[in-house]
Image: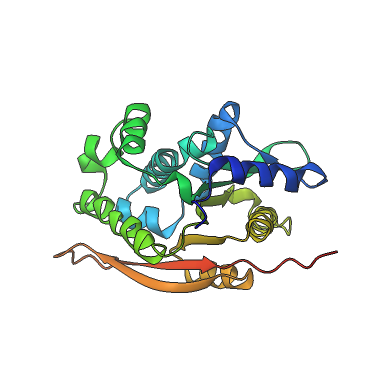
Amino acid sequence: MRCRLSKQELNDVISSQLKDSSNEVVVLSKSNEKDALDVLGDAFKNDPMISWVASVDDDDPDKTNKLLKLSRYMTAFVSNRLIRGERGCALGIRDETSELVGVMAMAPSGCTANIFDFLISISRFGVPPMYKEKAHYGPTSKQRLNLLGKIDAARRENMKETKRWIYLQSIGVKVECQHGGKGYGSKLLRTLNATADFLGVSIYLETESEDLESMYMHFGYNTVEQLKLCVPGDEREDSALTMYLMRRDPRQIEAN
């Protein structure tokens, strides 16, 4: 029986895929960490999950800053070790001025996150902002954040019979670059799909937007589960968050 997909295998194939490519996609490293985390923080500041966790009132005059702060923290917490190459790898895409505008972080199945990842991220970024600034976020914000653990549990359950696969941890493009027909996110996703097809492995991801679910379906992903998250007793209008858990199986590559 083949072993789980390793970081080295993933890195080798991605490097090979990009070697003769003339597009803007590049492999990121530790030196790119700050810029990459800035891109992801900006990309997800309007994300439904960030808004749900923050639970900030719409009439709060500082809502935008609070969401951006939480977005930067959450994306850095989960993606920093992938961008640094410690537990996976990350790709970036640059615009015509060579500015980093999109980032995709992924982990092979052989690098499953554990308690050490949690402790390392805590040491680097501290505790979540709602633990330090309780009055700045909603009354159920901490409980909502804790509920995200159910997403990890669902991932393990959905992929327990699959040894070799890639987890798409995050993919994001700066808000100002998401429109205009540049297709930055699509180029990143196509690179990942081509890598998975070459390796003959599946890809797993989560999204919390019906629009993004439809977009991923266009790229060959199928929804394997809808996960509804809601804190018991939470009576706010936005109390429930629906996550779409998706998978793409490899396509056979035709011989030349």
- Could you tell me residue 30's position as x and y percent? 56, 28
Residue 155 horizontal side relative to residue 29, left or right: left
Q: Most extreme residue toward the right, as rendered?
A: 256
- Could you tell me residue 253's position as x and y percent? 73, 66
Viewer-side residue, 188 vs 249: 249
Residue 185 horizontal side relative to residue 46, left or right: right
Q: Most extreme residue toward the front, as rendered?
A: 1
- Could you tell me residue 251's position as x and y percent? 66, 69
Viewer-side residue, 41 vs 21: 21
- Could you tell me residue 25's position as x and y percent? 71, 45
Residue at left 28%, top 51%? Answer: 145
Number of on-image labels: 0
How is the rendered protein coloured? Answer: rainbow
Residue 104 horizontal side relative to residue 1, left or right: right
Viewer-side residue, 208 vs 56: 208
Residue at left 56%, top 73%? Answer: 214
Q: Is residue 239 visible?
A: no
Residue at left 42%, top 45%? Answer: 71
For the C terminus, the image quarter is: bottom right
Residue at left 58%, top 42%? Answer: 90
Viewer-side residue, 170 vs 235: 170
Q: Is residue 78 visible?
A: yes
Displayed quadrant of residue 161: bottom left
Q: Is residue 205 above or below residue 78?
A: below
